[in-house]
Amino acid sequence: MARTHISGFPRIGAHRELKFAQESFWRGESDDAYLRGVGKELRARHWQLQRDAKLDFVTVGDFAWYDPMLNLSALLGALPSRFGFDPSNLSLAQYHELARGNKAQPAMEMTKWFDTNYHYLVPELDSETTFNGGVDWFFDEIDEALALDFAVKPVLIGPITYLWLSKSRVAGFDRLSLLPKLVIRYLRMLDTLKKRGIEWVQLDEPALCVDLEDDWIEAFSAVYNVLGDAGVKVLLATYFDTAAAHAPAVAKLPVHGVHIDLVKAPQQLEAWRSALGADKVLSVGVIDGRNIWRADLGEIVSSLESLHAERGERLWVAPSCSLVHVPVTLASEKRLDAELKSWLAFATEKLDEISTIALALRDPAAAEPALAAADSALDTRRASSGVFNVLVQRRVAAITDAMACRKSPFADRSRVQRHSLKLPLLPTTTIGSFPQTPAIRQARAAYRRGELRALEYLERMRAETATVVRKQEELGLDVLVHGEVERNDMVEFFADKLWGCALTENGWVQNYGSQCVKPPIIYGDIYRPEPMIVDAAGHAQSLTDRLIKGVLTGPVTMLEWSFVRDDQPRATTALQLALVIRDEVVDLEKAGIRIIQIDEPAFREGLPLHKADWSEYLDWATRAFRIAAGGVSDATQIHTHMCYSEFNDILPSIAALDADVITIETSRSSMELLDGFGEFAYPNGIGPGVYDTHSARVPSVDAMQRLLERACEVIPAERLWVNPDCGLKTRGWPETEAALTNMVSAAKTLRQKLAAQRTEASRIASVACRHAARSGAAR
Ligand code: GLN
Ligand code: ZN
């Protein structure tokens, strides 16, 4: 009999209970006990859902106050020493200070969890790190679940993945040197589990799904040779891509089972099936943990029948990865179109899908009604996609290579633009958004609730825009923006205006900490019924003589930050998005907007985990961007914006986007990032961010000027722009005005300095010329 389990359940709660409890705790409006109570309630509720769905195990250890990697650091007692906290006595308040920083220390670094949009807190390790102290929350939670009589399968991130994702502040430090200590600690933890009567523990090692260096692969085998024998059965969990290359080695280890992701990498099944002895558990991740479509249960069941005959209860059925990447439940969606809703499964509904598969394998007749329901939903979905927008599909089919190219090469365009835009050297600009004040948020909420009429709302937004434009003029910025006042979220805002996309009411997914996003659902062909921001940008332009830069979200980012239909290649959906953005860009140009920024902050995150798959992605992603940008004349300047700090390995593709200007995040790496651009001889305009907009700190004129001078050493001043790292949406006005005042003044000072240097240089040159001419004449 196949068994059923999950890797993890969303912890935030169907109504973001955890978020609100955390935020009130941070504000000091509630205490430890209250926050702990909310956590306990959520865990019990989520375990109960797993039991209600008749899963064989409930998963414990997937809960975290802020982030599971941080919880693991807290459990191991491996805290950054700079905070000076006592690891065995860590309070909830201190735990959150690690995540958010405090007066004395900046927060621990946060970065993306593999190729997802979830962010984890990067462990900070050094040679002094020990794994001895730590909090007991993990074990307390297990006791909690045992007390409630659940069949508990604890889950922990494995030691290899933990180390691989960590960093050291000491250059050249070999993290693997910590492995022996770490393994001893894991052994102790497994022993504690054994004493509690735990049969199975899941150790997550998604690091096996990336291109791992040899020393890490060797370390991996050594570790699991030890951990596999600790007296608790180990289920080694891989996900996000194939781990097939490791199947032969893993089969020889004393681990008792392996979980594999068959949604992302179905082709790996055969490798595991033949390598892994029939006495071992094979857990198949057949339900998509990262997307929200109802699965084709009938097909999954038939694909598993022979495997089930082979392995019986040693076949486990599960989602591909943790369900934290999907919303909690469809039950909270009251306004979603009924037919679309019938095509979907969020985390709670996926639990039922899992148990239906197991039931169908065991007792096909009993599963019949559930399978039939799934089937009919799929039938309507297939039938509808047949009649979607023929118009859109024809346009995609008619895309030509010429559409992916600007009319002239950058050198020619930039000459035309210099002539027509008449910008000073080192032009100053911002990334798009300005502070979203309480007044703006309130107006938006009132409009959503139907308390503000459309026209009243529009008037308020226009008034806000007018304020933002005036402030930018006063600050002396060269290229202004309309401030994105009407945008709640840069993806949701556009998805709301496009056909083929749907928004949920409560489809929240944790992005990091208490921060959640509501990814739109791209369910059909994308059509733009009318212009999206032309009115707002045109209005802003009518208020000022300076140039307004129109800002919109690019096709790759729209795709990456949405739940995307799975019935056609992502590349095709990207092209559909590219076409509507292209139309918008052309309409903006027609409306007199001469600088247009197409944001692609998610461009890098679409990269596959295995380098071998990169070029395919980069090809279609680059093409999508170029099509979005390619409809305008040479005189229109196209910008793009990206905000992360790893560009070096994809610089050729960044250059291939052929944006006239790219603005990037660089201030936190004090411009080091730019060296890569310099070495690669990045050909186009570039605006390296001169200050970090993620913090309220106001950098001095001097500090920014120094950064700019560094930038000038790498990139010719003619191609340099001056701007912050990212948008200013989450900032307040006082620090925004102060920082931008300093930024503008840094740019002006440097501009004068450069002008003076140039006058001096040309004076010397002309003296030299005269001299040469004279001596030439004398000869
Ligand atoms: N234009 C967006 C803004 O300024 C860009 C946001 C982003 O890069 N994440 O808010
Ligand atoms: Zn950004």
Image (cartoon, rainbow, N blue to C red):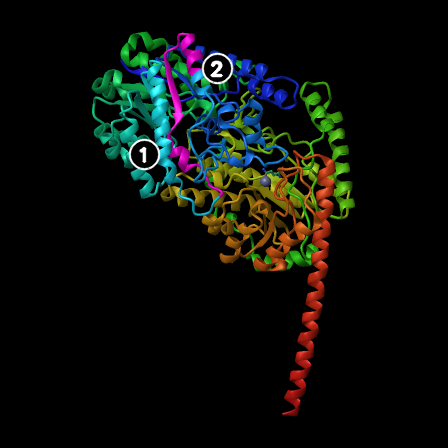
Residue that badge 1 annotates: 243
| First-in-chain label (2 vs 1) | 2
Q: In which quarter of the image is residue 312?
A: top left
Dividing the image into 4 quarters, which one contains the N terminus? top left
Query: What amino acid does circle 1 point to?
Result: Ala
What number is the disc on residue 110?
Answer: none
Q: Which residue is drawn at 32% across and 24% down?
A: 235
Q: In which quarter of the image is residue 446?
A: top right
Disc 1 crowd rating (10 Å Cα; few below 14, some 14-19, many 20+) is many
Instruction: Tell me: 586 left or right of 443.
Output: left
Q: What element carries label 2?
A: helix
Residue that badge 2 annotates: 43
Visible residue check, residue 261: no
Task: Looking at the picture, tell me which residue is in the foreground, 602 or 126.
Answer: 126
Q: What element carries label 1?
A: loop
Tell which tag, 2 or 1, sits nearer the viewer: 2
Dividing the image into 4 quarters, which one contains the C terminus? bottom right
Please report the bounds of the magenta region as a residue range. Answer: 141-169
